[in-house]
Image: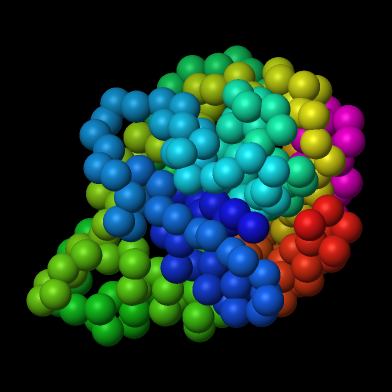
Amino acid sequence: MYLAHATSFCSGVWRPVISRLEGLHCVAWDFPGHGVGPPLEPPFGWHVFAERVLEITEPGGIGVGHSMGAAALVMAQLADPGRFRFLLLIEPIIFPGPYGREEHQLSLVAAKRKAVFPDRESARENFSTRGVFERWHPQAIGGYVECGLVGDGPVELACDPLVEAEVYRGSTDHDTWDRLGELDVPALVLCGAESGTVTPELARSQAERMGSAGLEIVPETGHFLPMERPELVADRVRRLWEMFG
């Protein structure tokens, strides 16, 4: 079972999901420019994330990805058909064209993000009081504080704000949307009903283009479904494992 994280985060955010998957072998890793992943310097394209998936995974597994991580799993599967037996895709960042690097609100905000904190506890307090984290499971916040920050005294974000901004700029610079019909494995697309990142309408279009994909819209949930509803994600993972494992 391979679990791929979203932009700016790290493998640790999967902890509340993995803790509910006792008995299953789970592998979560840090993408380049994130956590303890390989260093990454702008400019770069999203192919680096798909390449990392191919480096980490073995053929025949089940892929579970969130946001950028979900897109990277799809890109890896397209590059190496048969890499996965099934894909659980949580709001994959796969948009229709036109394609190209684009400066937008997320990249502008990321480039100015506060990157240094006095210590991990200060960082935890900062994150816990910010809107995007308010519905996160405590284990997910704890995992992010542990692996998403580097340093022993003052700590700083492992994902440099300039790297994060470049990831967002590249989110519209890959043509994966045009190739969704080539996806050769069954998939399930999960989407938060309240998400403004991948809306339910977009998720429905993604699943329809895949041809062999189911769709589930999760009520009262935003874009950060694995961190907000880890019990639901773990339940879907276990069901898929029972079917395809």
Q: Position of residue 245 (x, y in %)?
A: 79, 57
Q: How is the image coloured?
A: rainbow
Considering every residue shown, the one lying at the far left of the view is 153
Q: Is residue 86 visible?
A: yes
Of residues 170 and 62, the one drawn nearer to the viewer in this rendering: 62
**Above/below status of 88 relative to 19:** above
Q: Position of residue 158 (x, y in %)?
A: 27, 57
- Is 16 placed left or right of 45 in the picture? right
* Residue at screen point 26% across, 49% down: 160
Of residues 45 and 85, the one drawn nearer to the viewer in this rendering: 85
Q: Position of residue 101 (x, y in %)?
A: 44, 22
- Is 90 placed left or right of 7 in the picture? right
Q: Is residue 216 magenta?
A: yes
Q: Position of residue 42 (x, y in %)?
A: 27, 30
Please give the count of numbered marks on the rendered protein: 0
Of residues 77 and 67, the one drawn nearer to the viewer in this rendering: 77
Q: Is residue 110 magenta?
A: no
Q: Quadrant of the N terminus?
A: bottom right
The residue range painted magenta reads 203-217
**Above/below status of 190 relative to 71:** below
**Above/below status of 99 relative to 50:** above
* Residue at screen point 58% across, 44% down: 58
Q: Is residue 93 visible?
A: no
> Which quadrant of the figure has residue 103?
top left
- Is 204 placed left or right of 46 in the picture? right
**Above/below status of 161 relative to 52:** below
- Is 211 placed left or right of 203 in the picture? right
* Residue at screen point 64% across, 40% down: 59
* Residue at screen point 29% across, 44% down: 38
